[in-house]
Image (cartoon, helix red, strand yellow):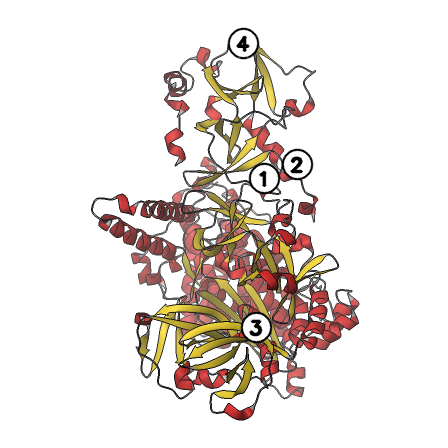
C-alpha cells in the first residue's frame, strides 16, 4: 500500500517522520498535562495544535490512513479548543491523552511492520472525540462526562499496557529495547544530547546546531577512546626512553584526556529526559487513585551518562508510583490531617562529589517503621528479638527486602511486596545506593546516589593468588590492615564464620581466595591481613585480600555470555600494563556466602558488643605544636597528606580540591588557640565527616590510633576542647569536632557525649555513602 | 608484550585470499571446496573453516577466571577486546596434559573466542569427496562440536564448528565447577 511495504523496510522519509513524531508526542504529553492546569493558555494550545497538525499532515502524505483519521479527529477537537469555542476539561484531556497513546501504538506498528494496520479498533475513540466536540459536553452536563472519564481511563489501561513496545520507539536512546527491525537500526540520538540543545521545550532553532548520531557509533567512539587512554598509559611507562624528554608524549597525553572528556560528554543526557515522562505518569496515577498531586521537578539540566539514565528510569517510575499509591493520602485524609488538599511530590537532581543525587520526596503519610518491622517479623525476615535491637534506620531499611509491603490493599500498581527490593537491586547494579528516610505523618524522602558514568569508574585494585581484581570504589568503605597482635586479638571465629571487631561493631569477613574457590591460607600462617570493607545491600562486610595494589580509573567491559552466570564478577577491564583484570561484584560475592542474609544476626551480635565496649574509645591522636589532641576515629573518614601549595583561599576560609569537591580546612592549632605554623611543605590532614559534610582538620603530625577507656577530666575544657584525658600515659585534649568544624564554616551535628559520639560516628561513616 | 607482534594473519596466505576473493557464483567448482586451518591437540587433528578463524596467536599470558566452567582457561586482551580462552580437551575427552602453545581466535556466533591448541598446522583444502560424517563410535560430547571428518594422508581431520563450541559454553548447558554459583 505505502511505498515502504514494497521494499519491506522503512525508507528515510518514514524513519525521519517516526523520530520527529515521537519527539512531538513526548512534548504533547507534557503540554497536555500543563494545559489541564492552565486551560486557557493559548500558547500551549497553539503548540499542541501545531504538533497534532504536523502529524496529521505528514501521515496523509505518507499514506497511513488510520493514523491520519485519529490525528484528524483530534485536530478538529483541538481547533475548537484553540478558538475558544470549547473549554478543556478532564474528559477532553483524557481523550486527548488517549489519542497520543493511540498514535504512539500506531507509530510503533509502523516502525515494526511498515503499515498502520495494527488491528485495533479506533471507532470508540473517534466517536468519543466527535462527541466531545459538542459544546454541551462542557455545559450543564459537565459533571457527567467528567465522572464517566474515570471508567474510560480504566478501560484505557489495557491498551496502555500494550503500549510497551512503543516505549522503545518513543525513547530513541534506548538501545537494549526491543530490536527494531529495518536496516541500520538507526536509533537516533536525542536533540537534548548536546549541551547546546539543552533548551527544553522550545528547541526549534537548536535543531540547526545539532546532528543526530547513532548510539552505536557513540559507544564505539567511547570504546576506542578507552583503548587510546590505555595505550597512552602504557606509553607513559616508556616516557624515559624518549629523546625529547617526553614533551610530545605529554602533549599527546593532554589531548587524549581532553578527547576522553569530550567523548564522555557526547554520551551525557540531561535528567530532564527522565523528568519529562513523569507529569503524565503522575497525572494518570493520581486520577486512578483519586488523589491530588502537584509535581515539582528540579535540576532537569543535571547530566548523566545515557546508560545510567536508562538504568534509573525503571526504578524511578516505580518510586513515583509507590509515592502516589501509598505515600500521598487521599484529599479527605489530608484535609483531616491538616495538610493541603493536594499532595506534593518533588524530585530533584544535582551533582555531589563526583556522583549524581536523585532525590524524591513527598509530603504523604510516611513509612511507619513499626508496621515495616511487624511485617518483616510476619514474613520471617527477622525475629522479634532481632527487631527489638535494630536501629530505626535499620528497620526502615527493611522495606528494601523482598516480600515487604506496608500497603494494606494490593493494587495493580503497588503493594505486592516486590518492587523496592528490585529498585535497590537495579540501583546497586550500576554502582549506586538507595536510602530511605521518613517521618511518619510528614512524608518520605528517597535518595538515590548514582555514578556519573558507567563506562569509566574509579576502582580499587587488589591482588588474590597472583591475579589483580578491581573493586568499584563506590562499594568500598575503607581499608583496614591488621598486623601482629591486632590480628590475633581482633579477628574471631563465631560459628565458623570470621568476624572482625571494627570500632565496636562486628564485621563479617570473607576471604577472597576462599570465595573464588582457592584453598584458603590458614590464619595462623598470615603475618598481616588486608581487609577491604565494602557495602553490599546496605550491609558492610570485610573482604580479606592478599594485597591492596592501588586505585585506577578503569574502563568497564562486559564479560562474555558464558561467564555472565558467575555472580562474583561484574565485568572485566584492561589494566595499564595491558593485562585483563576481573571486576568483582561485591553483592555477588556476599550473596553465596550468606553475609547479607545474616544482617540481622550480625546487627544483633554487634549490638551486644557495642554495649560491652562502650567504655572503650577508638581515638586518633594528633600532635599540634607540643600538645596532643584526640579525635573520635568514628568521624574520621581518611588520613591524607596534602601539598601546602594546594590550599586555596576563598574569602577568609581555606580549602583544597579533594576528590572532585572542595574540602574546607580547619587548623587544629587555631581551634586550640595557638598560632598556626607556616603554610608550606606537606600538611597532614584528617578528613572528618558528618553525614555528607566533610572538613579537613590540619594537624602538625598524625601520631597514632588508640583504643582506650577514656576517663575525661574537665580540666582542659575550653571552646573547641571537651576536656582532657590521659591516653598512652600522656595528657591529651579531646577535640570538640563540631566547634572545630565551625572554623572551616561547616556545621557538624553535636553528639551527646564522647562515648555515644563514637557509636554515632561509626554508624555515620557507614551511612555516609548510603545517604 | 603486546599480542600483535605474534599475530600471523591467516588471511594473508595467497590460497586463502584467492578463495575468499572469488565473487559468489564465479565458479561453482570452487564453492564446493572449503579450506581448513588445522591444529593438533594430543593426537587429534582438528580443522576449522578458515572463514571462521580470525587470527592465530602465540599462547601468551592470560588472566585466570576462578569459578568459571572448567573449559574456560582465562581471559586475554586482544587489542582492547577481552576474549575468553577455551581449552577444548575436556570437551574432546582428552587428558589436560601437554603444553598449549597457540591460541586460535575464532568468531563463534556474535562472540570472539580463543581456542587453545598444542600445535598449529597448515591450511588444507581437502576434496569434498573425502568428507565423511562423524563415526557413530565417537563419544557424544565430541559429536556435539564436530560436524564431520576428512580422511587425509595418514590422519583423520575432525571438522570443528566454533558456533557449537560456544553453545556448549553457555551457562545453561554447563555444570559449574563450584556449587557456589548456583546459589
Determine which of the numbered discs, if any, sits on residue A90 in the image.
Answer: 3
Q: Given contact means CB atoms under 8 Å apart, are the residues at marks 1 and 3 in contact?
A: no
Residue A16 vs residue A466: left or right?
left
| Location of residue B174 in the rendering, given as x and y in whole percent from the top left corner | 66, 36
Badge 2 and badge 4 in a common chain: yes
Q: Chain of mark 3?
A: A
| Location of residue A641 in the rendering, given as x and y in whole percent from the top left corner | 40, 68
| Location of residue A589 in the rendering, given as x and y in whole percent from the top left corner | 62, 53
Q: Which residue is mark 1?
A: A562
| Front position in the image: A229 or A319 | A229
Label 2 SS: loop
**How far is mark 2 from mark 3, CA to CA?**
57 Å
Badge 1 and badge 3 in a common chain: yes
Of the two numbered discs 1 and 3 on the same chain, state the one appearing first in sequence. Answer: 3
Q: Which residue is mark 4?
A: B152
**How far is mark 2 from mark 4, CA to CA?**
33 Å
Residue beneath the point at 56% across and 64% down: A433
Residue beneath the point at 52% across and 88% down: A722
**How far is mark 4 from mark 1, CA to CA?**
34 Å
Q: Which residue is mark 2?
A: B174
Of the two numbered discs 2 and 4 on the same chain, state the one appearing first in sequence. Answer: 4
| Front position in the image: A50 or A478 | A478
Q: Given contact means CB atoms under 8 Å apart, are the residues at marks 1 and 2 in contact?
A: yes
Amino acid at each position: 500500500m505505502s511505498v515502504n511495504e514494497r521494499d519491506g523496510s522503512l525508507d528515510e522519509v518514514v524513519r525521519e517522520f517516526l523520530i520527529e513524531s515521537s519527539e512531538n508526542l513526548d512534548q504533547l504529553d507534557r503540554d497536555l498535562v500543563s494545559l489541564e492546569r492552565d486551560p486557557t493558555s493559548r500558547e500551549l494550545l497553539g503548540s499542541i495544535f501545531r504538533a497534532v497538525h504536523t502529524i496529521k499532515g505528514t501521515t496523509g502524505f505518507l499514506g497511513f490512513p488510520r493514523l491520519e483519521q485519529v490525528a484528524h479527529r483530534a485536530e478538529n477537537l483541538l481547533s475548537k479548543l484553540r478558538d475558544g469555542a470549547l473549554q478543556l476539561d478532564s474528559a477532553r484531556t483524557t481523550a486527548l491523552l488517549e489519542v497520543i497513546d493511540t498514535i504512539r501504538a500506531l507509530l510503533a506498528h509502523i516502525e515494526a511492520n511498515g503499515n498502520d494496520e495494527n488491528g485495533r479498533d479506533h471507532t470508540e475513540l473517534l466517536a468519543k472525540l466527535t462527541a466531545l466536540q459538542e459544546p454541551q459536553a462542557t455545559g450543564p452536563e459537565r459533571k457527567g462526562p467528567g465522572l464517566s472519564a474515570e471508567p474510560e481511563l480504566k478501560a484505557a489501561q489495557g491498551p496502555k499496557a500494550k503500549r510497551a513496545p512503543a516505549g522503545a520507539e518513543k525513547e530513541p536512546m534506548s538501545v537494549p529495547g526491543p530490536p527494531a527491525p529495518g536496516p541500520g537500526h538507526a536509533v537516533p540520538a536525542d536533540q537534548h544530547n548536546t549541551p547546546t540543545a539543552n533548551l527544553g521545550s522550545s528547541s526549534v532553532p537548536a535543531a540547526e546546531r545539532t546532528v543526530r548520531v547513532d548510539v552505536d557509533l557513540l559507544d564505539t567512539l567511547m570504546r576506542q577512546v578507552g583503548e587510546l587512554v590505555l595505550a597512552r598509559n602504557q606509553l607513559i611507562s616508556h616516557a624515559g626512553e624518549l629523546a625529547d624528554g617526553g614533551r610530545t608524549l605529554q602533549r599527546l597525553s593532554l589531548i587524549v584526556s581532553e578527547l576522553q572528556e569530550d567523548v564522555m560528554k557526547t554520551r551525557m543526557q540531561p535528567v530532564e529526559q527522565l523528568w519529562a515522562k513523569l507529569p503524565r505518569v503522575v497525572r494518570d496515577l493520581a486520577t486512578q487513585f483519586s488523589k491530588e498531586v502537584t509535581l515539582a521537578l528540579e535540576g532537569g539540566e543535571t547530566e548523566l551518562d545515557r546508560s545510567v539514565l536508562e538504568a534509573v528510569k525503571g526504578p524511578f517510575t516505580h518510586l513515583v508510583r509507590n509515592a502516589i499509591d501509598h505515600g500521598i493520602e487521599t484529599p479527605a485524609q489530608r484535609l483531616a490531617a491538616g495538610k493541603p488538599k493536594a499532595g506534593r511530590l518533588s524530585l530533584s537532581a544535582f551533582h555531589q562529589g563526583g556522583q549524581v543525587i536523585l532525590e524524591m520526596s513527598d509530603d504523604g503519610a510516611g513509612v511507619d517503621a513499626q508496621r515495616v518491622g511487624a511485617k518483616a517479623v510476619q514474613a520471617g525476615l527477622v525475629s522479634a528479638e532481632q527487631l527489638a535491637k535494630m536501629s530505626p534506620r535499620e528497620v526502615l531499611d527493611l522495606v528494601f527486602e523482598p516480600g515487604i509491603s506496608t500497603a494494606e490493599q494490593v493494587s495493580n500498581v503497588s503493594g505486592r511486596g516486590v518492587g523496592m527490593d528490585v529498585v535497590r537491586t537495579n540501583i546497586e547494579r550500576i554502582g549506586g545506593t538507595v536510602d530511605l528516610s521518613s517521618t511518619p505523618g510528614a512524608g518520605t524522602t528517597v535518595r538515590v546516589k548514582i555514578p556519573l558514568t558507567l563506562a569509566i569508574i574509579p576502582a580499587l585494585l587488589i591482588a588474590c593468588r597472583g591475579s589483580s581484581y578491581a573493586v568499584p570504589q563506590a562499594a568500598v568503605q575503607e581499608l583496614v590492615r591488621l598486623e601482629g597482635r591486632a590480628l590475633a586479638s581482633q579477628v574471631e571465629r563465631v560459628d565458623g564464620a570470621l568476624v572482625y571487631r571494627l570500632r565496636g561493631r562486628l564485621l563479617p569477613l570473607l576471604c577472597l581466595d576462599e570465595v573464588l574457590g582457592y584453598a584458603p591460607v590458614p590464619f595462623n600462617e598470615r603475618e598481616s591481613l588486608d581487609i577491604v570493607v565494602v557495602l553490599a545491600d546496605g550491609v558492610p562486610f570485610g573482604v580479606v585480600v592478599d594485597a591492596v595494589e592501588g586505585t585506577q580509573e578503569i574502563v568497564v567491559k562486559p564479560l562474555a555470555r558464558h561467564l555472565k552466570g558467575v555472580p562474583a564478577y561484574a565485568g572485566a577491564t584492561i589494566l595499564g600494563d595491558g593485562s585483563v583484570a576481573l571486576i568483582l561484584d561485591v553483592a555477588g560475592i556476599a550473596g553465596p556466602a550468606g553475609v547479607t542474609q545474616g544482617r540481622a544476626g550480625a546487627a544483633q551480635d554487634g549490638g551486644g558488643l557495642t554495649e560491652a565496649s562502650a567504655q572503650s574509645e577508638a581515638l586518633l591522636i594528633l600532635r599540634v605544636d607540643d600538645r596532643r589532641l584526640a579525635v573520635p576515629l568514628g568521624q574520621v573518614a581518611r588520613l591524607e597528606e596534602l601539598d601546602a601549595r594546594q590550599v586555596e583561599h576563598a574569602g577568609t576560609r581555606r580549602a583544597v580540591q579533594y576528590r572532585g569537591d572542595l574540602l574546607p580546612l580547619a587548623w587544629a592549632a587555631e581551634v586550640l588557640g595557638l598560632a598556626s605554623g607556616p603554610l608550606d611543605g606537606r600538611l597532614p590532614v584528617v578528613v572528618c565527616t558528618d553525614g555528607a559534610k566533610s572538613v579537613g582538620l590540619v594537624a602538625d603530625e598524625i601520631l597514632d590510633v588508640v583504643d582506650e577507656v577514656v576517663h575525661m577530666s574537665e580540666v582542659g575544657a575550653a571552646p573547641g576542647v571537651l576536656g582532657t584525658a590521659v591516653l598512652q600515659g600522656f595528657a591529651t585534649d579531646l577535640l570538640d569536632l563540631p566547634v572545630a568544624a565551625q572554623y572551616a564554616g561547616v556545621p557538624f551535628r553535636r553528639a551527646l557525649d564522647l562515648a555515644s559520639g563514637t557509636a554515632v560516628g561509626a554508624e555515620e561513616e557507614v551511612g555516609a555513602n548510603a545517604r | 608484550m603486546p599480542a600483535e607482534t605474534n599475530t600471523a594473519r591467516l588471511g594473508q596466505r595467497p590460497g586463502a585470499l584467492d578463495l575468499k576473493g572469488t565473487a559468489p557464483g564465479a565458479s561453482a567448482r570452487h564453492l564446493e571446496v572449503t579450506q581448513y586451518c588445522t591444529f593438533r591437540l594430543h593426537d587429534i587433528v582438528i580443522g576449522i573453516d578458515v572463514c571462521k578463524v580470525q587470527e592465530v596467536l602465540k599462547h601468551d599470558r592470560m588472566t585466570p577466571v576462578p569459578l568459571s566452567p572448567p573449559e574456560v582457561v582465562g581471559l586475554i586482551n586482544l587489542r582492547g577486546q577481552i576474549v575468553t580462552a577455551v581449552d577444548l580437551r575436556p570437551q574432546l575427552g582428552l587428558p589436560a596434559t601437554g603444553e598449549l602453545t597457540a591460541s586460535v581466535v575464532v568468531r563463534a556466533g556474535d562472540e570472539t573466542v580463543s581456542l587453545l591448541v598444542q600445535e598449529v598446522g597448515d591450511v588444507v583444502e581437502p576434496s569434498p569427496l573425502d568428507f565423511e560424517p562423524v563415526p557413530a563410535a565417537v563419544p557424544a560430547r565430541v559429536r556435539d562440536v564436530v560436524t564431520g571428518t576428512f580422511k587425509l594422508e595418514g590422519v583423520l581431520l575432525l571438522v570443528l564448528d566454533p558456533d557449537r563450541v560456544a553453545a556448549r559454553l553457555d551457562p545453561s548447558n554447563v555444570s559449574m565447577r563450584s556449587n557456589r554459583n548456583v546459589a
